[in-house]
Amino acid sequence: MIFSAFAAACADHSIPKAQLPELDTTNPLLAEWDTPYQTPPFSKIELKHYEPAFDAAIACSRAEIEAIVTNPAKPTFGNTIVALERHGALLNRIAGIFYNLLEADTSDEMQQIAERIQPKLTALSNDISLNPELFARVKAVYEQANFGLSKEEEKLLEDTYKSFARKGAALSDADKELYRQYTTELSGLTLKFGQNALAATNAFTLNITEPKKVAELPDFVRDALATDAKARGEKGWTVTLQAPSYVPFLTYSSDRALKEQLWRAYNSRALGGKFDNTAIVKQIANTRLKIANLLGYKCYADYVLENRMAESTPTVHNFLKELLDATKSYAEKDYAMINAYAKSLGFEGALQPWDWAYYSEKYKNEKYALNDELVKPYLELENVKKGVFLLANKLYGLNFTPNSAIDVYHPDVTAYDVTDADGRFMAVLYLDFFPRASKRSGAWMTEFRGTKTVGKQEIRPLVSLVMNFTKPTETSPSLLTFDEFDTFLHEFGHALHGMLGQGEYESQTGTNVYRDFVELPSQILENWGTQKEFLDLWAKHYQTGESIPAEIVDRIVASQNYLAAYLNVRQLSFGMTDMAWHTLTEPFEGDVEAFEMASMAPTQVMPVIAGTAMAPAFGHIFSGGYAAGYYGYKWAEVLAADAFSLFEEKGIFDAATAMSFRSNILSRGGTEHPMKLYECFRGHKPATKALIEKMNLGE
């Protein structure tokens, strides 16, 4: 029989029962979920369930497409465009679970499953986008007079047509086969890249058994390293390449030999060795170039940027150059300042990259009387979480209630019901805070389910935040650094974008926007992290309950532009090397390390270290969605600086400004061009000077 999970997925377009495959309802991925808000029943899902479920869902998706293609009725917006938008719901549900867990709680077996599934999904995607009969129906709707469509519907029609064209629908039969070949190759390469990067990160540890080598470290660092060592069955203290371990050791240890060893290991991950990604980097870049050329573009960046706010490669180059020209000399002064400070303390020679964190932290502590050890007691994770929830409540009226009845995928994860001021259910929010070997590094927001409206039923999102924060130890709870607090705000901004999304079509709601726009909601929220009015509400010492002193808040505010130019130029270097890889116009067979060195040369402030390169572990651009798009972080910083200035003018909790940001930005998703949405909120186009002015350079 056809189970109701699939029937619900097909509710928007009639499919003859004879065309539908039967589903094994004993597989929890294919069964109807009798769970709160139809959340995934993680505890019932086993690895053995994934492949059969994917195969069944792919068959269902093919049946849905066949029904659209063979529909004898004239192509219309409803029977073609909406039917396409709604198809694949069962497959999306399964993929939403599998691929999110592949990043957050993976295993060798799960990675092997991914390698087997990926070619099938790529083949399905190509079979849809390269189907001439299907494209003919889409084109017929696109070219006819579509009177009466709403703006949302017009945008969906335009997006659907462009998506087909950009995925090879208009190619010759021979070129379509090449497109299939290239996209299949690329899919496998990006998957392998991510697996290698994770394995290389986990492969290195530094075990220290001499007490004198850790005696100078703050208690919170030493305790965390001891906890890691104990968990690994090792004596003493263990440093890993996970950020909560790696960064504090570089920051507080004066042992240059150990720090150099650690820094080189981190910055040569997957650069040669067992998990070498260098050949894969070149293959990914070259395959993307082939795809771009096949579709009529000079380089991959030209192809990508056609669907971005920036719109063109020259615009991005000019944007990065403008910011670099305005800040490079100040970045060099930042380096010279810290170098001179280190020499005043007896350091000889020029500061190397592994020295930077230690001396810049000491200088910050001396100038601003501010360091992580001073701030961390006021940033106990539970309090920070309450503060972030409070911010969402004051701005948007949201409330967060833990729900233990919701199944979670790991014991570290907590699930929350999210409701608005009227008690309306808005979302489920999953929080996953701590590092583990099964989780990739970094921090990210994702969804197990997006937002859409089917008939009269509004389906609300299941949003997940995955981070790698400092873990609790045997002697203290999780105490965050200010950078980790900033990361929490950043990712929570993405979560708000997802949780407050409204709309009929999932492809247009929440974070389904242009990549250089998606970082605006995340980056603007970081601004509240240095607002005394906000911190005073919740930031309390985890032992004494004392509110964070005004003088510490003042120091945080005073230091927020500390090394701003250096950090800006460092970020620009990532954007520039990304653009270098994706503006190649000829296949690249050279040396990855040398290419990266040349691409970053205009931004170089720190000494260059041979035998290192970030590309082999640069997941954002080689296995994530930021290829030819890393500039978007700086682009969004400009948007965020300009947008937050309105909150500064009106009040950081001003209800009218918050409502405008919600209604024009957060709730609208990709229903209109982002520049129009931004101008509706701000009243004008953004300019780079907003970010440059925010840095207070020269002061």
Image (cartoon, helix red, strand yellow):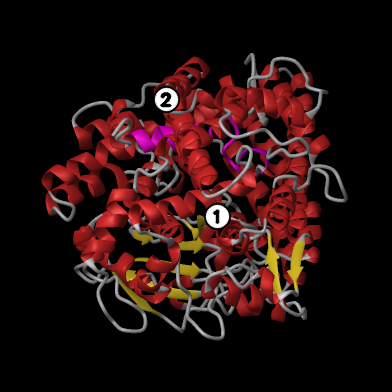
Q: In which quarter of the image is the C terminus?
A: top left
Q: Residue 122 got which mark?
A: none
Q: Residue furthest right?
A: 274
Foreground disc of the pair 1, 2: 2
From the top left corner, tell me how far across and down residue 334 is, in percent. Answer: 45, 36
Q: Mark 2 points at which residue?
A: 323
Residue 630 is inside the magenta segment: yes
Whether residue 100 is visible, yes or no, is yes
The earlier-in-sequence mark between 1 and 2 is: 1
Residue 629 is inside the magenta segment: yes
**Closer to us: 172 or 517:** 517
Q: State the extent of the magenta-drawn residues as a range.
A: 620-638
Residue 432, above or below 450: below
Quarter holding residue 282: top right
Q: Badge 2, how many Cα within 10 Å: few under 14, some, many 20+?
A: some
Q: Mark 1 points at which residue?
A: 89
Q: Is label 1 in a helix, a strand or a loop? A: helix
Residue 688, above or below 654: above
Q: Badge 1, how many Cα within 10 Å: few under 14, some, many 20+?
A: some
From the top left corner, tell me how far across and down residue 15 is, in percent. Answer: 57, 51
Q: Quadrant of the N terminus?
A: bottom right
Q: Is label 2 in a helix, a strand or a loop? A: helix
Along the horizontal axis of the image, is 658 left or right of 191? left
From the top left corner, tell me how far across and down residue 238 is, in percent. Answer: 70, 70
Q: Residue at x 67, y 73 (%)?
A: 212
Residue 125, above or below 232: above
Q: Which amino acid does label 1 sit on?
A: Ala
Whether residue 452 is visible, yes or no, is no
Q: What residue type is labelled 2?
A: Leu
From the top left corner, tell me how far across and down residue 487 is, in percent. Answer: 44, 56
**Closer to us: 390 or 330:** 330
Along the horizontal axis of the image, is 277 left or right of 692? right
